[in-house]
């Protein structure tokens, strides 16, 4: 009986640790810095889940637009990486093919580009609620 009780206690502890390891990281402000010389539309981004050794994807609804060399912020909940460091990001975006005199885009380039540089975000602490992450976007 003691062995069964001890086994159940250990199993319960193991399951609670596993659940804690795959928590959500809520209300993360992600700032995309546009270093591309044209306006871009952010379509989605990926972040690397080091613990599970896989890329995870977040779609950006309404295709978040950054005009020129500026930045923009989107708030997201990052799945399965609560209290884990996130060392790598990939950003998928379209870029403006033709801009008018006011810097507005007249035609978006067909197809999407994946940022060639995978951004290693310096000094990213463990992902926690309400944290801020800046991701540079380079051509």
Image: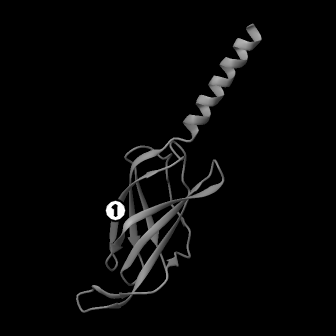
Q: Is residue 27 above or below residue 94?
A: above
Residue at image position (76%, 12%) is 3
Residue at image position (45%, 75%) is 93
Residue 75 in the figure: left or right of residue 7: left
Q: Position of residue 31 (x, y in %)?
A: 38, 62
Farthest residue to the left: give it.
102
Asked where in the image residue 107 lies, by quadrant, the reply is: bottom left
Quarter occupied by the N terminus: top right
Q: How many marks?
A: 1
Residue at image position (49%, 72%) is 92
Q: Is residue 109 above or below residue 137?
A: below
Q: Is residue 120 above or below residue 17?
A: below
Residue 101 in the figure: left or right of residue 94: left
Residue at image position (34%, 62%) is 73
Asked where in the image residue 135 lies, by quadrant, the reply is: bottom left
Nearest the eye: 125 or 52: 52
Asked where in the image residue 109 lies, by quadrant, the reply is: bottom left
Q: Position of residue 14 (x, y in %)?
A: 65, 28
- Which residue is under mark 1? 73
Q: Position of residue 51 (x, y in %)?
A: 63, 47
Farthest residue to the top: give it.
1
Q: Is residue 104 above or below residue 30?
A: below
Residue 95 in the figure: left or right of residue 82: left
Q: Position of residue 32 (x, y in %)?
A: 40, 67
Nearest the eye: 99 or 43: 43
Circle 1 — which element?
strand
């Amino acid at each position: 009986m003691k062995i069964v009780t001890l086994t159940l206690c250990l199993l319960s502890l193991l399951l609670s640790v596993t659940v804690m390891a795959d928590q959500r990281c809520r209300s993360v402000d992600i700032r995309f810095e546009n270093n591309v010389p044209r306006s871009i539309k952010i379509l989605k981004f990926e972040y690397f889940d080091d613990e599970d050794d896989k890329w995870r994807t977040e779609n950006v609804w309404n295709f978040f637009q950054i005009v020129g060399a500026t930045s923009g912020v989107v708030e997201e909940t990052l799945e399965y990486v609560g209290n884990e460091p996130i060392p790598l990001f990939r950003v998928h975006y379209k870029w403006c093919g033709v801009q008018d005199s006011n810097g507005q885009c007249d035609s978006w380039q067909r197809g999407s580009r994946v940022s060639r540089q995978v951004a290693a975000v310096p000094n990213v602490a463990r992902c926690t609620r309400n944290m801020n992450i800046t991701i540079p976007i380079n051509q």
